[in-house]
């Protein structure tokens, strides 16, 4: 396996864009990425598209060539990957693996989702299709209620509190307010976060990520070729994808995700590092409790300590282990199929020292964790300066 | 790249199964494949699922772990691939590439689609999402009408006739009648095929493939390990995936598919053979005209000669180049996400000399061609006895 580098990145702003369709978002991100990488369309050997539910949200399927040809790529393998909210994390995984193994040299990965053209109840229904529709969803669960159960249990087992959850929301809004591409650029107080409209007890509105439109793109290449394209290649030190049961009721313990632990173990081993070496991370905070569980499953803190650690401010930009300096899914937005690649873009931006007001002091070694459903799919990527 | 072998295959019958859901079909194929390969679930390193439109047909998304965990696989990367009707051909492509490059040893690929739970007009609408919904589909086209235009133009340019199209249907029904797993096991006469109910002129009912439920699975492994599992490994001699514009109106010439030509060129080069070496083939006859165009794009015959060659009987089991001895999509059935892997199963069955009444005399070197949409995605696989 040869070392792989990210040689370029590009994103659309995230938000609700009534006048934009899926393809125009994907093309904007792809074109920005081409410019950033100094790569031409005819240099790309393979194209991967991460998208969760384009057919349901927009009516369009067969999305990989639909996007790649609009970016002037024909002839090459153009493949859509679906892994729920980890769709484009998985697309990035397969792209990196392909380059590492010598199957391809230059590979583009785009993640995209166009969600806001559907009314919110229909969006909730489309998202619920990432759960087990023959079980938990049939019984009336949606993702807010599934993660509410996880939160309840986490509170019961470990003493996590509503204040802990709210601290995650406050921190992510604080970060997102500094991100010009974030969907919701506003700070909130702890009191506001505590008093949000109830969604599924104990989660309120401020515990839930956003319904957004957006796209993100990266180009990967063998590290030895990376400097032909950019002065700032970012090395992929380790990456892994893992899977687990879709239905929450099939899990032995709902406050930990074995797929996250499995992917993290492999990614750390590949990178030759341990969790304490990670300087910052973009974690999949689809709900505030998900960020807390993720930091535990990734080994940033002991089991059950994620809430306390967050409330102590250790995950703020000024803390010991900054998490979601981008604003995360909570404030930056969560166009589900775009999120995995957007996380990579955010980590790349920090490592390149291009994160503007959100720039972290320690930014040489970052991790991105992209989750699908209530833990059935997970991709963990570790990136570092070259 | 190391040589790769198919070490096992398994399929459900294809048909309309009111009492079966998507997962039970996928699991049946997967379990048959495990038994056929002599592989246990815990030996599998990665899982790929080919599925086109499960969310639209059945409401269930996030399909890879939904299926893989039901086959007792957890922890590994479980990835769904969507490439319209080439979804599972593409899943097979990525699996083979991953093994060839040393990323994985044992990989399972399942293709599945459950279509018949929706009424036919809704099925047509779901399938049309593989076309360009911002153009040709918005204007009222569906796949029958798109392929009707291709047929019309082929007739105009090359003198192809209605009889030529009907000959393809008659031959595929003749073959499918001998296939115990085929959806429609009945022979038809040329007169019947000519007099079918009009669908989109010049295509009638007998020119169109079937709306089916079904699943198919294969397991691939490094060839050097294959004989640890089976006495009859089948070698993947060459495989390639290519892409092109989704909308028919973006193509310069609608009677040839550049993605098929590109994939074929690469697959032949990898196998070190030419089209004339291919002894038999499973081609993507979503419509009769598609089989004719495919045999031309694959170089089996000169441009424009596919209809004449078919009418001369050269693609029958007794002919020079038997095509779709399984019955093809026309008679075997076309559960779209299952079709690519089912083609591989059919080629493997011939090479292993296990095709029963359909067994071909020359069966050492076979090709499978899996098409997505009106040519935007294509996977060509060349398999041979080891």
Image (spheres, coloured by chain):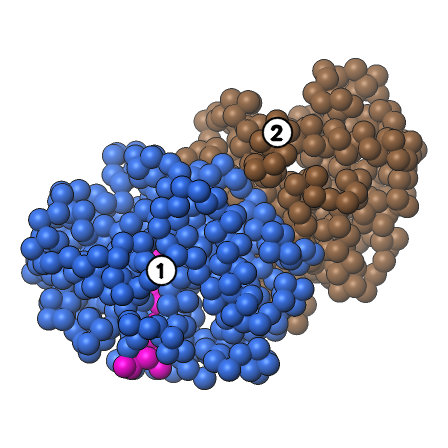
Chain colours: A blue, B brown
Q: In the rendering, which numbered label is found on residue B139?
A: 2
Q: Is residue B162 left or right of residue B53?
A: right
Image position of A62 with respect to A322: above or below: above
Name the residue rendered at 75%, 59% in the picture: B267
Element at badge 2?
A: loop
Look at the image and say whether residue A362 sits in the magenta stretch: yes
Label 1, residues with CA under 10 Å away: few <14, some 14-19, many ≥20: some
Q: In the rendering, which numbered label is found on residue B198?
A: none
Look at the image and say whether residue A324 sits in the magenta stretch: no
Image coordinates of residue A367 in percent, x first then y, are 34, 72
Image position of A308 with respect to B23: above or below: below
Region of the chain picked out in magenta, as a range: A361-371
Most foreground residue, B143 or A372: B143
Image coordinates of residue B136 in percent, x first then y, are 63, 34
Disc 2 from disc 1: Cα separation:
35 Å
Tell me the quadrant of the picture where the N terminus of chain B can be found.
bottom right
Toward which corner of the image does residue A175 lie, by quadrant? bottom left
Element at badge 1?
A: loop
Badge 2: chain ID: B
Residue A314 in sight here = yes
Q: Is residue A261 left or right of residue B108?
A: left
Q: Which residue is mark 1?
A: A181
Name the residue rendered at 33%, 35% in the picture: A119
Label 2, residues with CA under 10 Å away: few <14, some 14-19, many ≥20: few
Image coordinates of residue B158 in percent, x first then y, are 90, 35
């Amino acid at each position: 396996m040869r070392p792989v580098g990210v040689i370029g990145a590009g994103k659309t702003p995230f938000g609700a864009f009534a006048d934009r369709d899926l393809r125009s978002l994907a093309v904007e991100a792809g074109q920005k990425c081409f410019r950033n990488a100094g790569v031409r369309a005819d240099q790309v050997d393979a194209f991967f598209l991460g998208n969760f539910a384009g057919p349901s949200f927009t009516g369009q399927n067969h999305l990989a060539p639909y996007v790649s040809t609009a970016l002037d790529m024909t002839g090459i393998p153009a493949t859509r990957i679906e892994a729920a909210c980890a769709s484009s994390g998985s697309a990035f995984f397969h792209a990196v693996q392909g380059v590492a193994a010598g199957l391809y040299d230059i590979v583009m990965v785009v993640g995209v989702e166009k969600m806001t053209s559907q009314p919110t109840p229909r969006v909730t229904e489309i998202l619920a299709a990432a759960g087990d529709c023959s079980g938990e969803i049939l019984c009336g669960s949606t993702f807010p209620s599934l993660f509410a159960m996880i939160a309840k249990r986490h509170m019961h087992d470990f003493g996590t509190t509503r204040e802990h959850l709210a601290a995650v929301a406050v921190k992510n809004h604080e970060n997102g307010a500094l991100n010009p591409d974030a969907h919701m650029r506003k700070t909130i107080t702890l009191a506001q976060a505590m008093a949000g409209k109830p969604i599924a007890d104990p989660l309120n509105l401020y515990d839930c990520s956003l319904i957004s439109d957006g796209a993100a793109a990266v180009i990967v290449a063998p590290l030895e070729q990376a400097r032909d394209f950019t002065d700032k290649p970012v090395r992929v030190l380790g990456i892994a994808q893992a899977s687990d049961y879709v239905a929450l009721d099939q899990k032995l313990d709902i406050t930990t995700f074995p797929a996250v632990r499995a992917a993290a173990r492999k990614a750390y081993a590949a990178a030759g590092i341990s969790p304490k070496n990670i300087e910052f991370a973009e974690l999949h905070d689809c709900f505030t409790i998900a960020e807390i569980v993720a930091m535990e499953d990734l080994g940033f803190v002991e089991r059950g300590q994620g809430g306390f650690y967050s409330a102590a401010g250790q995950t703020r930009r000024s803390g010991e282990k900054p998490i979601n300096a981008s604003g995360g899914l909570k404030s930056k937005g969560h166009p589900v199929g775009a999120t995995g690649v957007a996380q990579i873009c955010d980590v790349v931006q920090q490592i390149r020292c291009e994160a503007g007001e959100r720039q972290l002091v320690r930014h040489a070694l970052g991790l991105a964790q992209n989750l699908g459903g209530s833990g059935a799919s997970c991709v963990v990527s570790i990136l570092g300066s070259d």
